Image: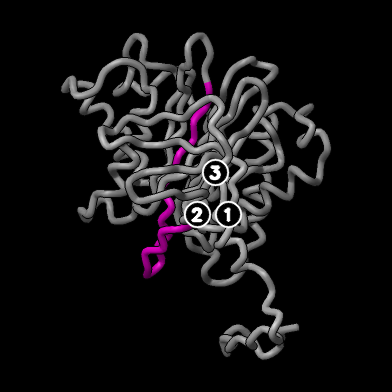
Amino acid sequence: MTSVAAWERRVGERSEMVVASDSRLGGGEEWDACAKIFDIGRDDAVLAFAGHTWRALPLVFQAVATTRSYSGSSLRTLDLPQFAKHLESVLNVVLDEAKGPASKEPPHCEFLLAGWSWKKNAFRAYRYAFDRTAWRFVGIASPQQLPQALRAPGRGTIFTQIGDGGWRLQGLLARDYNRGAISGPLGYHPLEYLYRQTKDASLEEASVGGPIQVAKVYRSIRVEHFAVRTEDGLSISGRPVLPYEHLDVRAIERRDDGYWFTEPMTAQIPALGEALESLDEDEKGDLPTPELDADAGSSASVS
């Protein structure tokens, strides 16, 4: 599965919605460089998934497409709670079109939509889980208070998760709050515990791994994706940053003591000049013709 969490983080008198995920995909391999948090064509929300990718990704792509197909969604005259309900309908009508023996199996995936509602003047998060009895995805709005296991004065309001790892993440946070190992508001505690999950080689965390990825939604109706810097290096959307890339995003960083931070005006992350030169065309002749995978189809061609 995976570990995805969304929570409202207090920043002085304001707050922001943080969405974080690991980057591992399974299916017979451990592929630790895969995006799981997506823009959906709106400036007030992001969408994340957990579960079987062969079912989840086509549904994510339809979520993006449905935003583009209606200007009221991209311009946000269709507020987030309304879009959340529409998304539930889109997920189900697309799933209904699946045919063949595999379509009789549950999709084994979940989705999380998190963002800002301008009508309610509040952050909102929605979980989409598959109901086997009704044989459809059901969208559930997260309560405007923390789960009972995490609830205490001053800790925050919204916390929700998807994926097997997400539920374990909530349990680990609750355990350490109760033990006094951590205290105060949620802050970046969920981010640190997600990072620890990716480093845990135990069997129960085998489905969680790779660089973590982070996005935020602000009250000003703006989405920001972050590069992430840890002792393992710099990553973006779950993959390593290439040496010639000039990132126009801020980085959220982890110190060795587990403290996470980002500066308000962090400078752009520059590319190395010599690495950029490696992208120049070879002036000595044509590029070598790659060997094509025969299983990719006989109609493939290289121009």
Pointer 3 with pointer 2, Cβ within 8 A: yes
Using the image, determine if residue 42 lies above or below residue 36.
above
Q: Where is residue 79 drawn, in percent x and y?
A: 71, 26
Q: Amino acid at mark 1?
A: Glu
Q: CA distance from mark 3 to mark 2?
A: 10 Å
Answer with mark 1 or mark 3, whichever residue precedes in sequence.
1
Q: CA distance from mark 1 to mark 2?
A: 7 Å
- Lateral position of residue 144 relative to residue 191, left or right: right
Q: Where is residue 277 drawn, in percent x and y?
A: 62, 65
Q: Where does label 1 land, which residue?
A: 245
- Lateral position of residue 78 relative to residue 104, left or right: right
Answer with mark 3 or mark 2, whichever residue precedes in sequence.
2
Q: CA distance from mark 1 to mark 3?
A: 8 Å
Q: Where is residue 204 drawn, in percent x and y?
A: 24, 51
Identify the secondary structure beneath mark 1: loop
- Lateral position of residue 212 relative to residue 237, left or right: left
Which quadrant, please, contains the C terminus? bottom right
Q: Is residue 207 part of the magenta span, yes or no? A: no
Q: Is residue 31 part of the magenta span, yes or no? A: yes
Q: Where does label 3 land, which residue?
A: 269
Q: Where does label 2 land, which residue?
A: 241
Using the image, determine if residue 253 lies above or below residue 55.
above
> Around disc 3, counting alpha carbons within 10 Å, would you say few (fewer than 14), some (14 to 19), or many (20 or more)?
some
Q: Residue at x 22, y 56 (%)?
A: 203
Identify the secondary structure beneath mark 3: loop
Q: Residue furthest right?
A: 71
Pointer 1 with pointer 2, Cβ within 8 A: yes
Q: Residue at x 69, y 29 (%)?
A: 82
Say the numbered circle drawn on residue 143.
none
Pointer 1 with pointer 3, Cβ within 8 A: yes
Residue 300 appears in the figure: no
Task: Give the magenta-colored segment's residue range.
Answer: 16-33
